[in-house]
Structure formats: structure tokens, C-alpha cells
Image (cartoon, grey):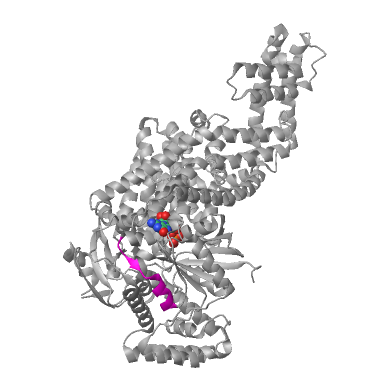
Amino acid sequence: MSSQTLLVALAGQPNCGKSTVFNMLTGARQHVANYPGVTVEKKVGHFRTDSRRVELVDLPGTYSLSSYSLEERVARDFILHDRPDVIVDVMDASNLKRNLYLALQLLEMEATVVLDLNMMDVAERRGISVDHAGLSKHLGVPVVPTVGKAGVGGKDLKRILDEEAEKPNKASYKIDYGTMEPFIQKMQDQVVSAMQLPETYPHRWVALKLLENDAEVLRLATEDPKSSETLTRDIEQLRKDFQEETGTPAERHIAFARHRSCAAICRDYMKLPEQKRASLSDRADKFVCNRFFGPLLLIAILFVLYEVSIVFGGWLAVKVWPVWGAVEAFAAKVLPQAGFLEDPLLRGLGVWVVKSTTAILNYLPIFFLLFALIAILEDSGYMPRMAFILDRLFRRFGLHGQSTLPLILGGVYVGGCAIPGVMATKAIPDERARLATILIVPMMNCLAKVPLYLILIGAYFPEHGGLAMFFIATVTLFMALPVAKTLSLTVLGKRESAPFIMEMPPYHLPTVTGVLRRAFERIWLFLKKIVTVVVAVAVVIFVLINFPGLSEKREASYQAQQEAVVGKFMKVVDKTSYKGELLPADVPEIVLFADRLKNAKRGLTDKSAAAAVNKSFEQANPIYYAVVKRKGADGKKLNKAFKKVVKTRKKLRREMRAERFESSFLGVLGRALEPVTKYAGFNWRINIALLSAFAAKENSAATLGSIYGIDGSGSVQESMKAGETGFTALHALALMLFMALYPPCVPTSIMVRMQSGSNKWMLFSILYQTLLGLGVAVLVFSGGKMLGLSGLQAMWGFYGLCVAATVIMALIPDRSAQKADIGKTCKQNC
Amino acid sequence: MTLDELTPGTGGVMKDLTAEGALGQRLMDLGFYPGATIKIVRNAPLVDPIELELDGYHVSIRHDEARHVEVE
Ligand SMILES: Nc1nc2c(ncn2[C@@H]2O[C@H](COP(=O)(O)OP(=O)(O)OP(=O)(O)O)[C@@H](O)[C@H]2O)c(=O)[nH]1
Ligand SMILES: [Mg+2]
């Protein structure tokens, strides 16, 4: 036995310190794994006791082991199916009674259980004392006091684990269910003995679960088609009999009896202080949840969060960019050399994939700061307070108090990112509100939508730039809220809406290591998931926008233009002393030589280093060097001609790219969509730009740039205005609104899939936003045109419409809400 | 009397639970059972939900849900 690995599960109620104990035992050697198909994380780590290797699994925190919530099912399934050798139940000693509720349920499963009495320091501080030896004797399992945060008790825990491994000691604690005992016996005799159960399922426990009407165990009972009908009938009958006899539903009786046992145990083995002082948390909450200061503090915290992560993080991202720039430069160096007009396929693809990846990596500083700040909010205990303050407001739209953070991260005002926004929805306990939040986060204004807004506003609303920016920045929320309500009344209507009941744990001071560890963990998860997919998608998009490629005739025409410009250069060469030394074949080489020289000197501030680079290039090829650096009279002459070559090359390449783009699969699609999109004011060129934005929204601006023939972004607006003569402010408005409602980009879609746990929701998310965006754009464009509105009039008209929709939606009652008259009770209440 | 009728600062002992299904389960899991002592701590800034102290720890709950808890 001692050579085998001992499988140990860490169970416990939320926030009792499981992860802290996990880190104490494993020394934080862990990796994060995702449960297949669900969003709940399970951590696995290893450590050694004196005599064996232990595999430790950190289960999600659960208040009990019913199968109502996902976390509970995950925890229970692990205990039942993976049958850990030992279960360590972490208990918050300062909150013993409630924690015992879970402990007793674990004991009832007749597993090998060790109770870890954690947070002993907190209990002590509050004057609570626990007789752990007595408790251990009463329950018949080892009880180990620990202080996870300070690393106290880890050794004891390991020693006990060793002992339990040598001599497993199955729990046999029985709760007295009083009037129910005969029914439990009957259930065991009539039903459980007829069931085909895995041998690890204790009969008394199964009988109790059947009386509780537990869906999972019931499924086990009815799986066997032979006996299922009579079994189901018997189970129902027993439950009914019990209720008739005692007047209480069986599940309620069971829970109450358990709680009474917990209370009895606490009376015997725990001493509370004579006098209860108001704890620091209580005093802090007077301020944090105050009617006036609470919302103010909330706004202040969100403001700091936004400033630090998005604003400061954005600044940091700019500072870090040279790193990713170096990666790009390195890739450009090792890939096959560029051609004069066309690059080798491998180079084009390689550069494209690297650029797609660095575009995401560019956001890394922002993500890191965000994750760290969120970890601070989570650890400190502020999250539940935030939900407490805002729940009333958000509930009107089918959302949840905890939808605040995801929306902020997504960019409620301007600048955010949907990826961490969707990621943060994990904290929302209500399935329906969580999905509604996931579905509206991509509607917020992420950073990548901003360049397109800026182009359009600069080109078509130059006099009202500030107003237009305010419009697009705030209208998104007024579009998202009614949509959330609509979704939650329709497609999400059947989803389970969990009750709000939520613990408000005492505040904890977050630790630096804890915060950093969590931030790094999440960054790592993010990188693993997103980057791999981004690479795969980048390849697909590359094919879509580059193939089938130019016709032979067009290729020949470009080739001829190249030859013409090279010919002109050669004429100048003939007038210099390099005649005969420089051949037409040298021209592309000189271009590449100049590029290499530029790259080698990029970022060099030191003069002598730059001189050294120059020197090595001169040695490598003195003639090329003379042309590029205007050395000597001939060099000067040739340099002038050479500059023309470079300029023409740039122009030709750009034209070819635009043409290849237009005739590509994506371009064809853009044209095919024109009959529909014209009602929204989009022609096929705009369609292509929008289609390319699906990979990453930054692409929209870049694509417009390449379509309208300008590379720098500063002048895209001018060239767009010149290129699209029929375009009006109304066109621009429709386009902006479509961009605001644009379907989630590829990385966000992946995140949606991860968080919603299904492809279906990902596809739904993409589809409904596309249709909604198109609908809104058509409404604004065609409607505005019909009414003869100017861009500005249409803008504010639409704004009014959205605000009205928000107010109306807020007033529609939720179908599933009970007809409780909150107004009435509140009158008595306040 | 039901829990949602209490005002901040007052309290009582829980008598019975009238909720079924997930709501009932959740309430019981968080420690609502006959005999538990409950004190209303405060209303949220927008009145709903309420924060209460249940056997020494803090729980927030909506008025809708508090209706299902009987106290005396
Ligand atoms: N004072 C004190 N604080 C502790 C102790 N153990 C954990 N904590 C703190 O309690 C908080 C919650 O700890 P976690 O380890 O995240 O709790 P958890 O059980 O993993 O929580 P969930 O995963 O959310 O269920 C953290 O802020 C810890 O620093 C302890 O023994 N004493
Ligand atoms: Mg944890």
C-alpha cells in the first residue's frame, strides 16, 4: 500500500480556506485543470508524507451535498465515483455549526474522513474555543486544528493522513432522524436492497437520499428498467406516507434534523464568548453597505479598477510592445525572405500568424493587472457586497448583482476587453443571469472597437466629435440592458434561476502571494486556451483572405510594372561607374538589404553601436551600401532612383493586396452580402472590413486602411471620405452601431464556449448579435433615410429609443418571479 | 410573521420554512432551520435585498425569498 499513491480530496464549504490548506500541504505545486465540459475548476497537486506520495484534489466549495448546484454535483461525483482514499473536510472553526452541516453529510457517506479545523486563529480572536479532542471522539474521526494562512498544523495533517492510509477508518456516525427512522429502515428494506448499486454506496445513505428526493440517486434507482416502475412508486409512497404522518416534507425533516445535530454538537464541544463584540467586518460594513457611501465607494472602486487596468495597463502595454515587436522582427528574420512583389507563402502565413498572436499578447499587461485586481476583490470579500448593493438594479434586467464586474471589464464606457469580462461571469451563482451576462458582455465597447469609431467620427462627425464619442460610449449599455431582459424572458426563460441567498463573509486582508498566484494561474489558463486557438483560426482566415489569389493576367500586369520601374533604375545605373556591376537581379536584393539595415538599427540609441552596424553592412556589400546610404556621387544619384523603386514597390504591393483581398473568398462573400447589407448602408468594401474583424476587431480599421490604400491610420479617414463619395454621416452612424453590436471576436467566442459550457451558446451568441447589429443598422440607416434625418438627428433619436426601451424593459415584471409585493413589505420595512 | 416583515435592528427565532425545491434546499444549506436565531442587519441601498445575521454569520437574501421563512 505504501508504494501506491494516496488519493486525497479536499472538501469544505466556500471560503473556509481549502485553497490555503491545499497550498500549505503541496507547497503550491499545482496545476489548474478544468472539469470536462463544465466551468468548475479542480486543482490537483502532489506532496509526500513520511512514507508515501499523496495526490491532493481541491474540490469546489459547497454548503451541502445535495445535487442542486453544479459545484455540489462536481464535489459529490468526485467523492462517489473517484472514491478518494481519504476526504479532508476543511472547516472554518469560527463558524463551526454551519460547517458541521457538510461534515455530517460526509460522515453519512461512510467515507474515510479527516476533519481539518481551520481558521483557529480567527476563532481564538473571537473568543470561541472548540474541544477538538472531544469532537473527534464523538464523531469517531480524527480532528486536526490548523491555521492555514500561517502554515500551522500542516505536519499534523500529514501525519494523520499517513495513519489513515495505514489503517483506513470508515466513518460510521449516525444522525438520529427521530420519527423518520422507521421510514429509513423501510426504504432500505423495500427499495435499496432491490437496487443494483455500486458497492461503494452505503445503503442508509442511499435510503436517505431517496427520501430527500435527490435527483441523482433517483436516477440510479430508475435506471434499471425491470424494477424501475415499482421502485419509483414505492419511493413516492414512502415520501407521501412520511409527510402525511408528520406534516413535514421528508427533505425538510432531514435537513432540520441534521441542523439540530450540528447545534447539539456545538453545544457540547464549543464555547462562545460571553459577550459578543461587533467585529471589524460589521463595523466596516456600516460604511461599505451604507445607503449613501456604499454606492459612492463602489463607483470609486470601479473607477480605480478601470484606471489601473485599462488606462495604466494600456500605458504599460505600450511600454512592453517592443518585446512583441522583437518577436515579430525575429520571425520576419527567420522566415523565408520577402520577394519584390510577392512573398513566399510560408513567409506570408508565418508573419500573419505571429502578428495575430502578438496582437493578443499585447494585452497581457492589461490582463495581468485585471486578474490581480479581481483576485484582490475576491479575496477581500468585497464581491458579495457589490452584488448586495447593485442586485436590485440589475435584477430588473434579468442580470445579477455580480454582473457589474464583467460589464465593467467588457468596457461599459470605452475601452475594455470582452475576454476577461466573459471570464469574470464565473462568479455569478445564478445560471440564468450568468448566461444573460455572458451574452451581453461582447456588446460593450472593447478597446479594439475604438479605432473604427475614431475613423468614422473623425471623417463624418468632425464638428461633434466629443458628442458622438459620448453617444457610442453610453448607448451600448442602453442597448445591452433591454437585450438582457429580452433574452432572459425568452431564450433563457426556462433556465434555472437560482435564489440570491448569499453569504457575506467577513473581510480578509488579501495576501500578496495569494493574489499573484491567482493572477498568474489565470494568465496561464488564458494563454493556453486562447493562443492555441488564435493560431488555428489565424491560419483559416489567412486562407480566406488570400485565396484563390490574382488571375494570371493581373499578375502579368503587375510583373510588367515591376520590370518598368527596375528598367528605369537600370538606366540610371548605366550612367554611373557601377555599370555592369549592378544587374536588374540586384534591385530586389538592394531593397531587402535596405530593410535589413533598417531593422538592425531599430531601437539603437547608442551612436557607436549604430556605426558598428553600418560598418558591418558596408563590409558585407559596399555597392548596395553606397546606394542605400547615398555614399559618393554615384551613390547619391542612384539613391534617388532607388527611392522611386521603393515607393513604387510599396504602391504595387498595396494594390495587389487590396486586389487579392477583393477577389478572395472573403471578398466574394462581402459582395454576396451586399444586397442585404445595403439597407444598412454597407457596401461590399465595408462588408469585407467587417468580416475581417471577426478574427480580431482591430482588423476592421487595418482592413479599411488597406482597401482605401493608406497604411498609416492617421489618414484613413480622409482617404475613406475620398474613396466613398456617396457616404454620409448616416452611413457612418449605422456602421458604428453595427460595430458596437458586432459578434464576439474569435478569442471571446472561445471564452463564451468555455464559460457557458456549450457550442450552442457560442453559436447563438455569434448569430444573435450579428442579426441584432444588422437590424439596428438597417433601422437607423433606412429609417433615418426615410424620415430624412441627418446623422446627428438619427443619433439622438436612436439614443432616446434605447433609453425608452431600457425603462420599459425595467418595468416588465419577470415571469418567474413570485407575485411578492416588495413595495408593500418595504413600506413596513423602512 | 415572515422574515421579510422584520425591520432592520429587530430579530427573532426561526419557526418554519415554507419554500420548496431549490430555494428551500438553498435556505436549508445556508443554515436556516427551526431554532436558528435571526437578526436583520440592514437593507441594501436600494432596499432589496436585506442582510441578516444568522447564528453568527452574515447572509443576504431578497425580500421575495425571505417571505418563505417564518419567525417569531
Ligand atoms: N485568519 C485566517 N485566514 C485564513 C486561514 N485560512 C485561510 N484564510 C483566508 O481565508 C480566505 C479564504 O481562503 P481560501 O483558501 O481561498 O478559501 P477556499 O475554501 O478555497 O474558498 P473557495 O475556493 O471560494 O471555496 C483567504 O483570504 C485566506 O487567506 C486561517 O487559518 N486563518
Ligand atoms: Mg478555493
Residue at horizontal 50 percent and vertical 40 percent from the top:
A365
Residue at horizontal 54 percent and vertical 91 percent from the top:
A194
Q: Which is nearer the eye, A160 or A456?
A: A160
Residue at the right extreme? A580
Q: Which is nearer the eye, A101 or A6?
A: A6
Residue A223 position, x and y percent, is 56, 83
Q: How many marks?
A: 0
Residue A710 position, x and y percent, is 56, 29
Residue at the top extreme? A633
Q: Is residue A204 above or below residue A41?
A: below
The quarter in which the C terminus of chain A is drawn is bottom left
A482 horizontally vs A606: left or right: left
A506 horizontally vs A600: left or right: left
Q: Is residue A364 above or below residue A248?
A: above
Q: Where on the picture, by quarter, is residue A711?
A: top right
Residue A60 position, x and y percent, is 48, 64
Magenta includes A269?
A: no
The quarter in which the N terminus of chain A is drawn is bottom right
Q: Which is nearer the eye, A690 or A774?
A: A690
Magenta includes A127?
A: yes
Q: Where on the picture, by quarter, is residue A324?
A: top right
Q: Is residue A43 in view?
A: yes
Q: Is residue A37 in view?
A: no
Q: Quadrant of ligand 1?
A: bottom left
A135 horizontally vs A59: left or right: left
Q: Which is nearer the eye, A458 or A777?
A: A458
> Which contiguous range is marked in magenta?
A126-139
Residue A685 position, x and y percent, is 56, 39
A493 horizontally vs A645: left or right: left
